[in-house]
Amino acid sequence: MPVNGKLQLTMAQRIAQAVSVFHENLTGHAPKSVTVVLSNNTLVITLHEALSKAERVLARNPAGAAQVQDFHRQLFNTASQPLREEITQITGVDVREAAAEIEPKSGAIVHAFTSGDMVQVYLLTDPISEAVWNGAGYSI
């Protein structure tokens, strides 16, 4: 929707851009794309091809994958507060909890898939109405 001659971004688009910029500033590597989906009060953010080439090579064996996962787990745990605050500012709803780790084979908690994709899940304190959200999801 244009506003004053400019295209107005949806919440999903704004969050996708914020996550992409945050990840690049934090790691020096921008994800290829970011997908944002909201269901009730659960915000799921997927960073596609978010690992650097060196991290992808390191993650080819179990020990290296564990190092990459641990690095990104620690990075997310220590540095995600500004992103949580930005999500709150964009949505108008506080982020109650944040997790950044799902291992696809066992369901164990990890952070980075060996493919380079990452999934971040944010549990908000309240649901956001579809009318306010402006869309079901967005990928940049």
Image (tube, helix red, strand yellow):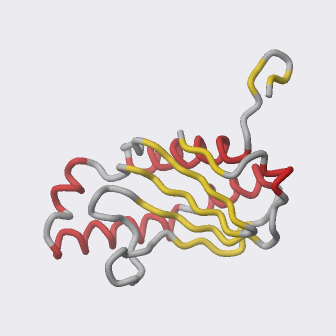
Total marks in image: 0
Residue located 33% across and 65% down the image: 113
Residue located 45% across and 53% down the image: 47
| Residue 6 image position (x, y, % from top left) | 76, 20
Above or below 25: residue 112: below
Give the residue at the far top of this rendering: 5
Q: Is residue 103 left or right of residue 23?
A: left
| Residue 78 image position (x, y, % from top left) | 50, 68
Q: Quadrant of the N terminus?
A: top right
Give the quarter of the image for residue 83. bottom right
| Residue 9 image position (x, y, % from top left) | 72, 35
Residue located 75% across and 58% down the image: 88
In front here: 9 or 86? Answer: 9
In front here: 131 or 8? Answer: 131
Above or below 68: residue 108: below
In front here: 19 or 33? Answer: 33
| Residue 61 image position (x, y, % from top left) | 13, 70
Residue located 42% across and 70% down the image: 74
